[in-house]
Amino acid sequence: MLEYLKIANSPILWISVIPAVGVVLYQAAAFMRKATESGKEMGITDEQIRTAKKSAFLAALGPSLVILIGMVALLTSMGGPVSFMRLSFIGSVMYELPSADIAASTAGSTLGTDDMTAAAFANAVWIMTLCSLGWIIVSALFTDKMGTLRDRVAKGSEEVLAVIATAGGVATFTYQVANRVVPGPISDQAVACYVAFIIMFALNLINEKKKLAWISQFGITIAMISGMVAGSFLM
Amino acid sequence: MKNNDIFNKDFIPYIIKNGRLLSLLGMLLSFGPGIALALQGIFPPMDALLAAVSIRLPMVAHLYITEPISYFAVLGIPGTYMSFLSGNISNLRLPCGSVAQESAGVQEGTDEGTIIATIGVAVSTFVNITVLAIGVVGGTYITSILPAKVLEGINLLIPALFASLAANYIRQNPKVALIGVPLAFAMTILGMGPLQVLPSALANSLPILVTVFGTMGAGIALAKKGKI
């Protein structure tokens, strides 16, 4: 084993990442408890909360698997603790890998090869940290202001609030799809998009007529897996 | 207390106070591994660090602004604090927040929607961290027994997820989609072509910002005219 990997997987490194992951877990638990309490007082039913949890759980499995694969790609060069922390914390699987890669290169090493050094490893750790701070700074400073701004635009109209949210959803997800379809309209990614889109759209239409509980809960998972399988025929 | 008061006078103040505090705490704790290395006398070479920052920062800096703005409407205040601390937003937090709201039958963007989105994002955090914890122990083994093609295929889950969610939103609000969908495609084409002459930070952020604000603007205009 390379010398620096002993450090990268050492107990001290594990200890150093636990507080960060701990804060994420603490926040999720605390906010969920508060939301459940307040939600019940506001008249949200136990059944609604249970359904929300169940569908969020199912929807989280697929993406978590993709993140896991990203983590495994990082593991060999960055060790367990740092890989585990970075993918549970500020940033994303799309952000961390290139960051580590660039940092290793500027330190004269190549990520995932034998020429990685302790200095290149340290460089990657610092770059992944420093270049992700912007997200949390913006979120810490401006989240409440975005709320105020939105409420000012909506002026208390539930209809406008709802349309802002659905318009945001239409825009961001269609944009993500366009980004994958435009460069190669018959690529594996594009086909995955087409198939998932058609199936989800059809399931929505069926659900509007027949109100089937399984569609609300498993619809996304079914569409997502179908898209993946269809797209992989083009790989 | 009325529903409105429970939400605005108790829930949201609690979230803002703790959200801000935990973000600052998270910012400090993110230096953990860097400090652990420094204590052992391991530092990044200064020139390599500066070079990497100067390459990487311009590639991601526009996301600090565009992501919170684009995703806020779906995530709400609590969801935004949680998502930016835990990361993997577009590919995990946002879908879970959205699916939770849809399945619970609450209207997104409303107080009830925000409550349910909070629960959805929290659940995604538990799932994500649990899967990673299992993976950090057995992940190398699991991936070594799976064929490379399967691993590549799994990466197609994310584009498929985006398309499924696009289908949901388009179905929810077809009138807004009539404007939003062409706009998203037009801005993508412009962004990959003509807009590349702009400075890269602008060329990268302009298409998504125009798409998001253009679609929201059109939606608000339609709603105010009572056409939605």
Image (spheres, coloured by chain):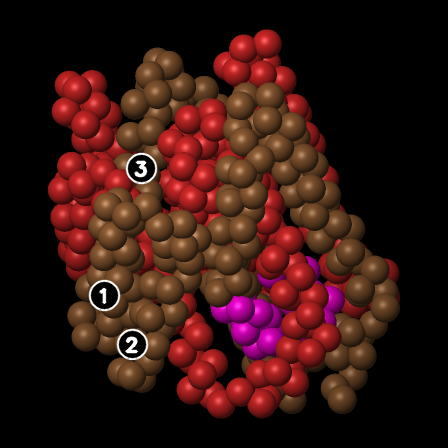
Chain colours: A brown, B red
Foreground residue among A136 and A207: A207
Read off the chain for label 1.
A
| Picture residue at 80% right of the left edge, 79% below the top | A6
Mark 2 or mark 3: which comes first in sequence?
A: 3
A188 left or right of B185 in image = right
Image mark for residue A194:
1
As shown in the figure, which amino acid type bears the numbered disc 1? Tyr
| Picture residue at 54% right of the left edge, 21% below the top | A42
Image mark for residue A166:
3
Foreground residue among B195 and B116: B116
A222 left or right of B184 in image = right
Residue B32 visible in the picture: yes
Under tag 2, what secondary structure?
A: helix
Q: Which residue is mark 2?
A: A230
**Badge 3, how many Cα within 10 Å: few under 14, some, many 20+?**
many
Q: Position of residue B102 (x, y in %)?
A: 40, 42
Read off the chain for label 3.
A
Q: Position of residue B176 (x, y in %)?
A: 19, 37
Give above or below for A83 relative to A175.
below
As shown in the figure, which amino acid type bears the numbered disc 2? Ala
As shown in the figure, which amino acid type bears the numbered disc 3? Thr
Q: Position of residue A19 (x, y in %)?
A: 78, 51
Q: Quadrant of the C terminus of chain B?
A: top left
Mark 3 vs mark 1: tell me if same chain: yes
Read off the chain for label 2.
A
Mark 1 vs mark 2: tell me if same chain: yes
**Badge 1, how many Cα within 10 Å: few under 14, some, many 20+?**
many
Q: Range of the magenta residues?
A: A65-87
Mark 3 or mark 1: which comes first in sequence?
A: 3
Under tag 3, what secondary structure?
A: helix
